[in-house]
Amino acid sequence: MSFVVARMQKMKAGNLVGMGNHNQRLTDNHSNKDIDTERSYLNYDLVNRTDNYKTDIQQFINENKSSSRAVRKDAVLINEWIITSDNQFFKDKDDKEIKDFFDTAKSYFADKFGDNNIRYAQVHLDETTPHMHLGIVPFNAENKLTAKTVFNRQALQAVQDELPTYLQERGFELERGEKGSERKNLTVPEYKKAKDELEEMTTTLEQRKSEVLALSNDKTPTIKRESLDLKDETKTVKVPSGETIGIGKLRHEFMKNEERKTGNVIIPEDKLNALIQGYEDLYKSNEKLKKYAETDLPKEITKVKGKYSELVKEYNDLVRKSNRNIETLEELEKENKTLKNEIKDIYKGFKAYFKDSKQVTTEQVKTLVGGVVDKVKEFVKGGEFEKIHRNETRTRDRDELSR
């Protein structure tokens, strides 16, 4: 059975223009070489609420967000899901069945994350495998823009668990990837290359199986009679000659000898031996072909399909791990920014304290602040505290020179 592939990527304002150009095929210069621009007319929209990705999505967010505060520049504006399966799943499906599959998947996300929050759903049929790009604005129930909450680890896990079941209940034979995989993750290019190689292997093996079965079931080759030097076997028999003598009971009919075919043929011994050997070889080859077709090839095909399924699972694991790393990085960036602000406040506090002290001159303030910075440097070399002091000293020196 094929697997559902559902992977998510986060889109900030700076990503939307490029993603829009790709999804809407606004350029013929694509980095993805699998795109066949001559087939791009086959692509279609299931949801088309966005003509200009950046402008329209930002406008939708500003008009619908509950907070009056401006959206942060580094905020995630769209969580884009790519939905697909393997070529085996799509192979025997017509256009309507493929559209029904993507429409059903879209309905799952609409039910779970809000239909109006889906700003685009574009199906691409001009690449190796049919797939859908589905963009969701991460509004929570209170219309607060918060990708970190809407698509947290639990939500991502729920999608991987629920989407296959949702599709199965509606007639699509698909299953989810394996949970808790510890296999080595592949990069996106590695996954794509391995996927293409496995699909090519599967196609080749299927073709070979068909060829072998056709050969093993073919008619026995004909052999021309002349090539065997066959001769009809005859025997001498007595037959009435038609001549008689005498009359009545004394009448006697003369017999004559005549050569007649017995129905058998005579074949030279060397030809007979060659014929027997040829058919024995043919029989053995035929049996081997049947055995190969019925055992080795199906096993090999199953093995290849198994490897492909593992790659799909590994790729999903890679996406989930990548999303977790992005969340951690965003948290660290936020924490780092907070710490920098705190250090600036501490530095300003030291400086203000020394300045307010009536017993300390301006030069003494400089010396005291410099001493504090030097003390901090003993513990943290090249830290934020030193950086602030260095920048301020340079600014002060420039100001004094310009006077």
Image (tube, grey):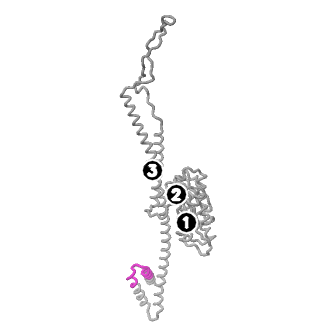
Residue bearing the label numbered 2: 3
On residue 134, the disc is none
The reply to whether residue 401 is visible in this rendering is no
Q: Which residues are magenta?
A: 374-392
Residue 215 colored in magenta in the image: no
- Sequence-wise first label, 1 or 2: 2
Q: Position of residue 219 (x, y in %)?
A: 48, 35
Quadrant housing residue 118? bottom right
**Marks 1 and 2, how far apart in space?**
16 Å
Q: For residue 210, say whether it is visible.
A: yes
Vertical position of residue 322 compared to residue 247: above or below: below
* Rendered image quadrant of residue 231: top left
Circle 3: element type: helix
Q: Give the structural element (helix, strand or loop) at label 1.
A: helix
Residue 283 image position (x, y, % from top left): 42, 37
Q: Position of residue 2 (x, y in %)?
A: 52, 55
* Residue that appears at 50% across and 56% down: 32
Q: Is residue 304 above or below residue 395?
A: above
* Sequence-earlier tag: 1 or 3: 1
In the depicted view, which residue is nearer to us: 148 or 352?
148
Q: Residue furthest bottom?
A: 359
Query: What type is the residue that disc 1 sits on?
Result: Ala
Name, please, the residue furthest toward the top: 246
SS for dot 2: strand
Apparent side of residue 134 relative to residue 372 in the rendered image (left or right): right
Q: Which residue is mark 1?
A: 158
Q: Is residue 230 above or below residue 112?
A: above
Residue matched to label 3:
299
The mark lying in front, picked from 1 and 3, is: 3
Which residue type carries mark 2? Answer: Phe
